[in-house]
Amino acid sequence: MSETLISVEGGCRLSGKIAASGSKNAVLPIIAAALLSSGTCKILDVPKLADVDVICQVLEGLGAVLSWQDKELHIKTTGLSSYEAPEELVSKMRASFLVMGPLLARMGKAKVSLPGGCAIGARPVALHIKGFEALGASVRTEQGYVLAETAGLKGARIYLDLPSVGATENLMMAATLAEGSTVLENAAEEPEIVDLANFINSMGGRIRGAGTKIIKIDGVTELGGCEHQVIPDRIEAGSYLVAAAITGGELVVDNVIPDHLKPVIAKMQEAGCLIREEESSLHILADGQLRAVDIKTLPYPGFPTDMQAQFMALMTRAQGASVITETIFENRFMHAEELRRMGANIRINGSSAVVEGPSTMQGAPVKATDLRAGMALILAALAAEGRTEISNINVIDRGYDDLVNKLSGVGANIWRSDQ
Ligand code: EPZ
């Protein structure tokens, strides 16, 4: 059976303008939240991603009517006919579990396949379930499915043991149609949560404090339709900053909210890159002389775990030793082995990796083990000598919209090929 690869001929200095698409991690919960609405939702700048296709299939399976006009998605959920999200879809994309809160709130019942673990970690959903129970639902797990029921959710005070992005989103959505008020404490503060709250409020929801550790939700009885523009993808934009730095290039990254990338910009400046912030773009100039810096991944506004792999690739080109500590996921260093195949000097010690640089990276056949690991291999390949062939690229297509065209548009020698 033939497989599609991404091939990269390294050594090109990138230059020009490249734009980020709408945010994957904002649009997935937003599409789920459309289930709360009794009207029609119009979502603008929806990225073309495999993960978006999956959540759209979940909604269609529930009876929603979806239609596209280029990157504009129209969702009508007046005639929902099911409350079940099947295993075959949820197993493809864990974030499908985010339909649980809206279904429970809207239909009083939800049956969603237990997402299970993935390449980067066990990814439990206990905090989601604990929160649904606090809102008055009865929840049980049966034959690999989570079943939840309620005669009507009631507002509650919920303290999250850790600031889980998914649990914050699922509970914020459930509480939107609950009777009375809910307070989420130790909530996650990611920009994608703020975008979700803005989407729900534009349908008539009453959410305050999104983006802080304490979110207050006053329940309403019904939500209408709305029109909403998704925020830009900060992780895609951050990946392009690294692309400029690792090739000693100069890029203007467009469609960015610079504030969302503060921890990434700070570390890249520490490594020796010049970055100028404009209103909705970032101008990066790099000369290829990079200093080693240490990073530690943390919940927002700390350094994002979704940029860790890309940064490890960058540090293979830096002068000195950098220590990369991963605190969010227990198994998010699989890219290190593939980078070593290309000539990197990386030692893993528990949740930390020590990268010694600069290494002269050589093109090689490598495998994308997960979404961000795949992007890290493309970045390393851009600066390597010779050709790199990356397999298992479906994981990359899950989260990067039109990546090959965008990178070749700024001078990368990159293409897809069937093998
Ligand atoms: C979201 O995942 C993102 N996905 C991830 O991006 C991102 O890495 C992650 O947040 C952290 O920023 C989407 O938004 C679709 P969490 P999520 O719940 O919600 C533990 C990418 O590359 N935890 O904040 O699943 C969990 O195991 C992806 O785009 C529990 O212990 O992340 C993890 O260690 C990858 N119990 C930590 O919390 C729970 O009930 C953070 O997970 C829930 C989570």
Image: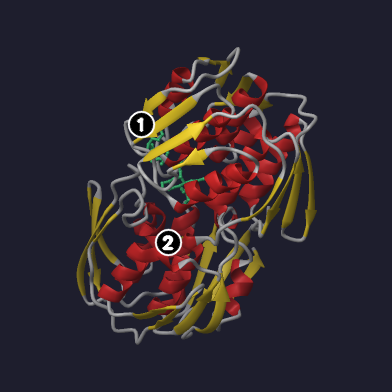
Say what amino acid the circle numbered 2 marks.
Answer: His
Q: Mark 2 or mark 1, which has the lower sequence index?
A: 1
What residue does disc 2 label?
A: 260
Mark 2 close to ligand 1, CB under 8 Å? no
Left or right, residue 268 beside residue 405: left
Q: Check disc 1: other Cα within 10 Å, few if <14, some if 14-19, many if 20+.
A: some
Quarter of the view holding residue 40: top right
Q: Residue at x 77, y 25 (%)?
A: 81
Disc 1 residue lies near ligand 1 with CB under 8 A: no
Residue 144 numbered tag: none
Task: Look at 73% across and 34% down and name the residue there.
Answer: 38
Tell me the element at label 2.
Answer: helix
Residue on which disc 1 sits: 160
- Hey, which quadrant is residue 214 in on the image? top left
Q: Percent position (x, y) of residue 131?
A: 44, 24
Query: Counting other residues with Cα less than 10 Å from the Cα at mark 2, is it few (<14), some (14-19), or many (20 or more)?
Result: some
